[in-house]
Image (tube, rainbow, N blue to C red):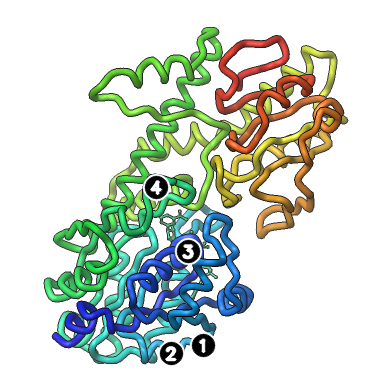
């Protein structure tokens, strides 16, 4: 088919919808491979930044955007350009709504925005993490409503993103990519789409299997983190250091994978995605108890950490109310700038609600402006002997490598460490 020949020759025009943590690296990869790429986003600020050769994601350098620009990449909020594209790749958010149910409005909104411009000879690929059946039940009928035949005129695939921002060992090219097609011809189109840009493709028998595989990966993580978080509480009561135990267990050369406890789950994926399956499983009369239980344990972790902060201050004759608490790390995991669903923010809110004076330090987030769900407006505090000594408690929430841990240890009067960063016991360090 002509589409496959154009993809193979790297002539096919690639349209990426949603230029965030997933869409932007993917755009760069297609551009560096030599494909003409167009970016589509509903956020005019992102479009303007990209067209000016600027990056808004810390680990993506502006140089890379500028290089893509010089190869012809441009971004737009105008979806009429869909017609020029041979491939349409959807990388839009899939959050939960306030009742913790899947919010597919971005996926459906994007699909409905592209449908008026669809034409024969295009492949549509959904990359957003979602419940098994989404591509088939939500995208397929909307695309079919155009009269185009799926598997003959247009091709529909699900190929989930496996991006791990900040991971220096893997990148878009080297992470094997799952691809499922709605029909065998769709799968072939999907393989041609990604075959030139990704080292290894993993074809699946259906889009549902691909959707489920992505969920299994993230559920596996959420459940195991829930397990070690529960064991952390048990170990704390028993006077055992969970981190020492995990390090020791990880010396077993087979059958054990280390997961690390923390102050709660964070990020756009692990706290969210498992509940996409929980919701869909209900339609089949099945309950997902491991997922619910892990969610319960992980969600309670910030409260448990606040209890440890309260006890540590109390042991020093202080109340949380009126105490100056400096939170280290506002990003949800180390060495990145992503604050979405960060447990640090939950900790800050809980402590502020108890009357603490909250400040934070994060080398990756110089300014913490109000977000959709949070109203903080703070600036990152520079860590110096004086700023540390002025606190009543330093709460280590995210263990960025950029922190000077010796400085913190030498000058903070009290450290509550939720990451096991301080291995040696000290009278002013409390593990939480
Ligand atoms: N961030 C990760 O590490 C990661 C990893 C694997 C999978 N995912 C999944 O990938 C998907 C995207 O996540 P992300 O982290 O890139 O999100 P993001 O919020 O960083 O980016 C999404 C982008 O989509 C844009 N957008 C929203 N509606 C749109 C529309 N109708 N048309 C065009 N653009 C639109 C937003 O403005 C934003 O720029 C989610 O399903 C997520 O679960 C994310």
In the rendered image, the vertical position of residue 162 relative to residue 16, given as above or below: above
Q: Are marks 1 and 4 in contact (CB under 8 Å)?
A: no
Circle 2 sits on which residue?
81
Q: Are marks 2 and 4 in contact (CB under 8 Å)?
A: no
Q: Position of residue 11 (x, y in %)?
A: 28, 84
Q: Residues within 10 Å of mark 1 (few under 14, many from 20)?
A: few
Precedes in sequence: disc 3 or disc 4: 3
Q: Residue 93, which numbered label?
A: 3
Q: Residues within 10 Å of mark 3 (few under 14, many from 20)?
A: many
Looking at the image, residue 248 sits to the left or right of residue 155; the answer is right
Using the numbered discs, state the Cα–Cα distance from disc 2 to disc 3 in whole angstroms: 21 Å
Q: Are marks 2 and 3 in contact (CB under 8 Å)?
A: no
Precedes in sequence: disc 2 or disc 3: 2
Using the numbered discs, state the Cα–Cα distance from disc 3 to disc 4 in whole angstroms: 15 Å
Image quadrant for the N terminus? bottom left
Q: Residue at x 57, y 24 (%)?
A: 421
Q: Are marks 1 and 2 in contact (CB under 8 Å)?
A: yes
* Badge nearest the viewer, 2 or 4: 2
Q: Residue 78, which numbered label?
A: 1
Looking at the image, residue 302 sits to the left or right of residue 276; the answer is right
In the rendered image, the vertical position of residue 398 relative to residue 52, given as above or below: above
Picture quarter containing residue 395?
top right
């Amino acid at each position: 088919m002509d589409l496959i020949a154009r993809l193979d020759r790297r002539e096919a025009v690639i349209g990426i919808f949603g230029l965030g943590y997933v869409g932007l690296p993917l755009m760069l990869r297609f551009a560096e491979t030599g494909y003409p790429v167009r970016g589509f986003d509903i956020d005019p600020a992102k479009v303007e930044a990209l067209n000016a050769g600027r990056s808004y994601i810390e680990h993506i350098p502006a140089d890379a955007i500028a290089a893509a620009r010089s190869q012809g990449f441009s971004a737009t909020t105008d979806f009429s350009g869909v017609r020029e594209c041979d491939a349409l790749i959807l990388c839009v958010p899939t959050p939960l709504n306030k009742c913790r149910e899947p919010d597919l409005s971005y996926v459906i909104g994007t699909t409905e925005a592209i449908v008026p411009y669809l034409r024969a000879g295009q492949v549509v690929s959904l990359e957003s993490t979602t419940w098994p059946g989404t591509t088939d039940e939500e995208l397929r009928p909307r695309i079919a409503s155009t009269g185009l035949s799926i598997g003959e005129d247009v091709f529909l695939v699900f190929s989930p993103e496996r991006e791990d921002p900040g991971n220096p060992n893997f990148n878009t090219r080297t992470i094997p990519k799952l691809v499922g097609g709605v029909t065998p011809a769709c799968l072939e189109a999907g393989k041609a789409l990604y075959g030139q840009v990704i080292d290894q493709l993993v074809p699946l028998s259906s889009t549902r299997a691909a959707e489920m595989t992505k969920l299994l990966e993230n559920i596996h993580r959420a459940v195991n983190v829930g397990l070690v978080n529960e064991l952390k509480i048990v170990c704390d009561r028993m006077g055992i250091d969970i981190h020492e135990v995990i390090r020791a267990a990880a010396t077993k050369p087979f059958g054990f994978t280390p997961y690390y406890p923390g102050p709660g789950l964070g990020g756009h994926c692990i706290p969210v995605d498992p509940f996409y399956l929980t919701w869909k499983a209900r339609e089949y009369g099945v309950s997902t108890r491991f997922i619910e239980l892990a969610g319960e344990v992980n969600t309670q972790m910030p409260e448990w950490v606040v209890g440890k902060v309260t006890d540590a201050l109390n042991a020093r004759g202080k109340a949380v109310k009126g105490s100056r608490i400096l939170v280290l790390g506002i990003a949800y995991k180390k060495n990145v700038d992503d604050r979405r669903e960060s447990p640090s923010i939950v900790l800050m809110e809980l402590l502020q609600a108890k009357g603490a004076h909250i400040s934070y330090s994060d080398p990756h987030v110089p300014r913490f402006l109000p977000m959709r769900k949070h109203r903080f407006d703070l600036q990152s505090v520079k860590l110096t002997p004086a700023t540390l000594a002025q606190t009543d408690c330093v709460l280590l929430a995210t263990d960025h490598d950029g922190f000077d841990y010796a400085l913190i240890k030498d000058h903070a009067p009290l450290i509550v460490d939720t990451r096991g960063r301080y291995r040696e016991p000290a009278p002013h360090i409390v593990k939480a």
